Amino acid sequence: MEIAVIAHDGMKADLVQFLNKHKSFLQSDEITLIATGTTGSKAENAGFKVTRMLSGPLGGDAQIAARVAEGKCNMVLFFKDPLAKHPHEADINMLIRVCDVHNVPLATNQATAELLIKAISQQS
């Protein structure tokens, strides 16, 4: 299962903490992680093997959306910062729309991400 991890700047520490909390499951042979550029480097620094795309504002969100549309990415964990402005809001909305069109689970906050990881880890 390929899981994309993305976080806005104000949420990167929260995402890394989330990844560490679920480290044993997320580092299993069943899971492949992909990420936007800076988020991916933060995850790598925490010890995760991650395939990094471009930074979100430089097209990383679009690259992940393309993987969703191609049926390669099975879940997206996108820790959005709802209190900050984002110059690439159109790309973010496009990623959310592509997940909806292709019926791919998308968590935009930690509570939803917890539920998704709990659900798939119980199936393994």
Image: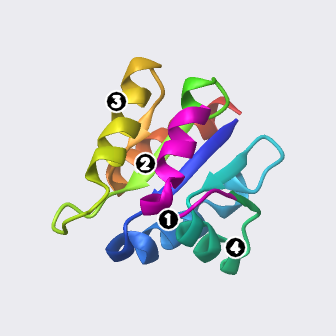
Secondary element at tag 1: helix
First in sequence: mark 4 vs mark 2: 4
**Can residue 57 be seen in the rendering of this structure?**
yes
In the picture of the structure, the residue carrying the numbered disc 4 is 44
Q: Is 74 a magenta residue?
A: no
Say what amino acid the circle numbered 4 marks.
Glu
- Looking at the rendering, the stretch of residues picked out in magenta corresponds to 52-67
First in sequence: mark 1 vs mark 4: 1
Residue 57 screen position, x and y as percent: 42, 61
Say what amino acid the circle numbered 1 marks.
Phe
Figure quadrant of the C terminus = top right
Q: CA distance from mark 4 to mark 3?
A: 28 Å
In the picture of the structure, the residue carrying the numbered disc 3 is 97
Mark 2 vs mark 3: give the one in front: 3
Secondary element at tag 4: helix
Q: CA distance from mark 2 to mark 3?
A: 18 Å
- Vertical placement of 23 versus 12: above or below? above
- Left/right of residue 61 with respect to residue 23 in the rendered view: left
